[in-house]
Amino acid sequence: MNEYQLSRLDIFCLGMTIKGAWAYSEAPDYERMKNALADIARAYPFLSGRYRMNGKTLAWDDGDGALPFSRADLRELSVADVIAKGDDVWSLVPPYDIKGFRNGSAGVFSAVLADLKDGAILFVQCAHALMDGDSFYGLVQDWAAATKGQAFRPRCFGGSPLPLPESISREETTRLVVEKGWIRISPWKMLKMVLGLALRGSSKKTFRLECSQEEITRLKKDSGAGTNAVLSAIAVKHLAARLKGHDSFTILLVADLRGRMEGVEEGFFGNMSQPVVAGRHINAGCGTEELAAMIEKGARTALEPSKVSDNVRLYVSASHYGLPYFFFDAADMNSGNPGTLYINNQLKFRSCELDWGTGFPAYAFPNDLTDMIKFWQPTAGGPVQIIFAGAAASIAAR
């Protein structure tokens, strides 16, 4: 019996599902996919494991068996029909059994290939507690490679490389978080944060803003910033124009810590993403190009390896000791007039290029996790979507 102890980052995602859906004009071969999934099960045996609530661990035996992959009939719908459903596409299949995962009755992985009138749509759903976006999309890419008969290198899954929480004493952790300006979470602020998260989780409303590749290229050239900073600047400017009383913002960017923190290799499988503060009190009244340059500079500073390691160590220790501090104001982020903006760039996963041997998808659907702002590309070479969710969607739609 093998056992994995969930990390602090894993436990934070315990009640969440990470998923993706892809519509294809030419249906992938179900039998080839099924045979290739057996290779994936052998390469990633923990996917058939079961969560143990008492010890917050995942347990599995090597060679536990096939992963769940079923076929469905949706031939009353065309590819155009499912694309038109947008966020409602998830109503076409049963949701992942997250409660079953938490009580140990359901595994980590689930997939369905549904036949359409003129193609197919693939749904993959997994427990977020065992993987972040980099791991999830990497896993599906490995499955696609195996389906095409290509070699793939399994990622490394095992003990968490996060620092031990006891590496800093409670007293020293408290001193450091206060010194670094972390937000003290009062009981009232905690209530606001919980209510905000609950409302954000219950609201599936989104608003999409499309950016052409030509516009992105121009702004990158004029600002000297990368794609993430340019799209972040567009998103911030869009919200700032619709908010009252805010001329500056705290900007958080979700960062992959692989290769940026000591002991965390590029091929690590699990949860290893965390928001970093790209800037506090960033003035959004300037031009988009200038704002993008400021965000780029702030992100580069925040992602210096020494800063990443120090911040993660503090986060792990503060969480372990139950200290009433957090490195950003989550209650403000979830409010109707936020000064804290949370941005998740999902372009790097290249989901729109997932090819099973029949070509790129006609449309790649984003997951429905309630990131405040996320960047997504549904078709290869097409425009990028800035997707606002929850309260931010209502603001962006004004």
Image (spheres, rainbow, N blue to C red):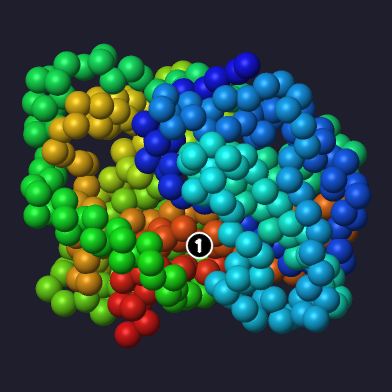
Q: Which is more toward the observer, 98 or 75?
A: 98
Q: Which of 132 and 111 is in front in this view?
A: 111
- Few, some or many residues within 10 Å of mark 1 (<14, 14–19, 20+): some
Q: Where is residue 111 in the image (x, y as percent from the top left)?
A: 71, 52
Point out residue 219 in the picture as x, y percentages from the top left corner: 46, 65
Q: Residue 102: x percent and y percent?
A: 48, 41
Location of residue 11 by image quarter: top left
> Is residue 379 among what the camera can see?
no
Query: In this figure, which residue is indicated by the disc labeled 1?
Result: 368
Residue at 63% x, 62% y: name it: 94
Q: In which quarter of the image is residue 213?
A: bottom right
State the residue in front, 280 or 158: 158
Please tell me which residue lies in front, 14 or 170: 14
Question: The N terminus appears in which quarter of the rendering?
Answer: top right
Amino acid type of the residue that numbered disc 1 sits on in the rendered structure? Asp
Residue appearing at x 67%, y 48% in the figure: 110
Residue 376 at least partly seen: yes
Residue 212's place in the image compared with 315, above or below, is below
Q: Is disc 1 placed on a helix, strand or loop?
A: loop
Image quadrant holding the C terminus, namely: bottom left
Q: Horizontal placement of 259 versus 92: left or right?
A: left
**In this rendering, would 48 be left or right of 162?**
right
Q: Vertically, is 380 above or below 50? A: below
Count of numbered labels shown in the rendering:
1
Instruction: Report the residue that reaches farthest toward the bottom.
Output: 398
- Tell me the residue at 80%/81% (across/down): 76
Task: Please provide percent x and percent y for residue 291.
Answer: 31, 61
